[in-house]
Amino acid sequence: MRKVLYIFLLLLWLLQRAGMGQSIGIRGWTVDEEGQLIEGVTIADSLGSKISQSEQDGSFSLSISLPRRICFTKPGYVDTCITVTLENTRLSVVMRSKITQVNAVIISGEGLRFKKIESGRLGTASIKTDSIRQLPTLTGEVDPLKVLQLTPGVGKFDLSSGLLVRGSTMDQNLVIFD
């Protein structure tokens, strides 16, 4: 009798385990209030373990275990949650637009300040004395050529002593010391 009871309990346990992990595929479309298909809607189950996204044509598919609550979210729309059972695996989800009313919009141009270009000074760079004093010195004196080479956009070309300024050649540079 005990042996029959153990076999019966084992079968009952196996049947219960087989029914627990069953998953079913749900399919459907996401549309707005006017019936237009919505792409990019995130579909997730309540546990967050299964996530999908609607295609360009608004269709989606997701495999979940039943019964499960799934939520549809997209910026600009009200989140919609539905409990899925065995009877409703083909869904057409209507999402309502989320309307946000703004009291006022202030646009300011304070962040855009343009430097006035003086005529004749286009393409020039001046180096202040304070920035020259911060550069490393050779035998206690500042090397003017080294100061120019350390300026952004200027470099030394191989072993020559000429300056190669971006967008020009070595013989097109005018250096004025004041």
Image (cartoon, rainbow, N blue to C red):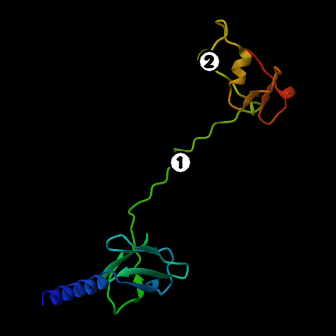
Q: Residue furthest right?
A: 171
User: Can residue 67 be seen?
Assistant: no
* Tally of marks: 2
Q: Residue at x 35, y 83 (%)?
A: 22
* Amino acid at dot 2: Leu
**Where's residue 96, x and y in %?**
39, 80
Q: Residue at x 59, y 17 (%)?
A: 134
Camera-side residue of 35 and 160: 160
Q: What number is the disc on residue 83? A: none
Q: Label 1: which residue?
A: 109
**Where's residue 147, x and y in %?**
69, 19
**Does residue 51 lie above or below 30 as drawn?**
above
> What kind of element bears circle 1?
loop
Label 1: few (<14), some or many (≥20) within 10 Å? few
**Does residue 157 lie above or below 52 as drawn?**
above
User: Can residue 94 be seen?
Assistant: yes
Q: What number is the disc on residue 135? A: 2
Cα–Cα span, label 1 and label 2:
37 Å
**Where's residue 107, x and y in %?**
49, 54
> What kind of element bears circle 2?
loop
Q: Is the N terminus in the top left, top right, bottom left or bottom right quadrant?
A: bottom left
Camera-side residue of 15 and 122: 15
**Is residue 68 toward the left or the right of residue 155 in the image?**
left
**Does residue 13 lie above or below 164 as drawn?**
below
Q: Is the C terminus in the top left, top right, bottom left or bottom right quadrant?
A: top right
**Where's residue 79, x and y in %?**
36, 74
**Is residue 36 toward the left or the right of residue 127 in the image?**
left
Q: Residue furthest bottom?
A: 87
